[in-house]
Image (tube, rainbow, N blue to C red):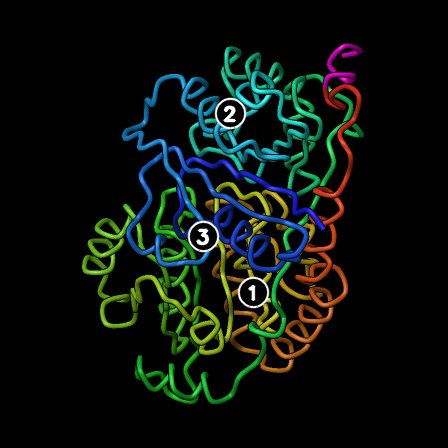
Amino acid sequence: MTRARIIHVLHRMGAGGTELALRRVVAGLDPDRFEHVICTVAPIPENELQGDVRLVSLERNGKKTGSLVADLSRLFACEKPDIVHSRNWGAIEAVIAARLTRIPRIIHSEHGRDIHTMNGDPWRRRAFRRFCYSLAHEVFAVSRELREHYTRQLGLAPAKMNVIANGVDTGRFHPDAAARHRLRGQIGAGENEIVLGTVGRLDPVKDHATLLLAAEQVISAGMALQVVIVGDGPGRASLEAAIQHSSALRGRVTLAGESARPEDWLNSFDVFVLPSLSEGMSNTVLEAMATELPSVVTSVGANPDLVDDNKNGFLVQPRDFRSLAERILQLAADPALRSAFGKHARQKVETEFSLPRMLENYSRLYALRPARRPVAGAAMGRA
């Protein structure tokens, strides 16, 4: 059997959700059917070069990279892939390069939004995105909300943009009493203390500042609380300053940094919180749900598709630290409610968002024969 060669193009490799989903796809698809090459626009971090999948980079630094079409065209002409799959705005020029080099199948997917354009892209970007969509054979988003956002902006029928949801490895992310005991001991959390935690890049879009404000409210209400923030990023210094400035938070917040075993940290939590201003489909929410954690998350992106309000968690509005604190207090004070929410969360993940289901969707996507003309292009002509 001849394997289909796929070149995955994205801006960079790192600790984000887009990269995590890509790693799961590459690791999970049948190696007898698919060969993978990952191409990044930005330089590749040293630690990423240790895997089995071949990585190449355009070695572009900085926010303004200039046109990528010529470099990508040369790469595609040399590699001769069967499929080019670009992800997000930072790699969308791969669609044009793939068209110019006559790649048989061209796919583009949207996995989230930039914090600077959460409410809509400038018209030039909208026009360019619309043009690139018209050249692709397949365009999809990882959530219904994200699909609606882009199709509304571009004046497209939502039916012309598919949805392939992320999936979580429920074998890796599950309740683990030993990990819970070990990690809670590491941070000095007592049996009667509530550990409130989150996992994700320390970036303004994740709005950890609101989490800290809510934690202050909960502690001021008399709740024995510890906060754990797993991840790293450009927002670390400002979080450290905010913690030191607050007498309520000082000594109660652990900035754990990046972890190769987020499943262990999740098991140490009693309540998971994600106060993001914007999301695509959060892998960390899925992982928390698989770990049987009740979640309090903002009602953005695909979060309402994952968290059923008052069934497996709570939804709050972005930046509303008072409502966030109220929901945390409600869960902290009621072990039976936490347990019931957690069991419902795990059940929903197993039913709707399992890793095998995601991999089957990608396998079908990559196995499809190219359409005679781009699917999105047909939609463009009628918009």
Is residue 312 shown above or below 333? above
Q: Quadrant of residue 185?
A: bottom left
Closer to the N terminus: mark 2 or mark 3? 2
Amino acid type, residue under disc 3 in the picture: Phe
Which residue in the structure is indicated by mark 3?
A: 321
Q: Quadrant of residue 241?
A: bottom left
Q: Which mark, residue 77?
A: 2
Kindly identify the residue that appears in the image at 45 percent across and 84 percent down: 179
What crowding class fits label 3: few (fewer than 14 Cα within 10 Å), some (14-19), or many (20 or more)? many
Whole-Å distance between the Cαs marked 3 and 1?
23 Å
Closer to the N terminus: mark 2 or mark 1? 2
Q: Is residue 117 magenta?
A: no
Q: Which mark, residue 287?
A: 1
Where does the image place residue 274, in percent across and percent down from the top left? 49, 56
Where does the image place residue 253, in percent across and percent down from the top left? 30, 68
Q: Nearer the viewer, residue 41 or 271?
A: 41
Q: Quadrant of residue 260?
A: bottom left
Q: Is residue 380 magenta?
A: yes
Between marks 2 and 3 in the image, the one whose residue lies nearer the viewer: 2
Quick one: SS at disc 1? Answer: helix
Q: Which mark, residue 227?
A: none
Q: Residue furthest front?
A: 1
What stretch of residues is rendered in magenta?
377-383
Where does the image place residue 66, in percent across and percent down from the top left? 35, 18
Kindly identify the residue that appears in the image at 28 percent across and 66 percent down: 249
Whole-Å distance between the Cαs marked 2 and 3?
52 Å
Kindly identify the residue that appears in the image at 70 percent across and 42 percent down: 366
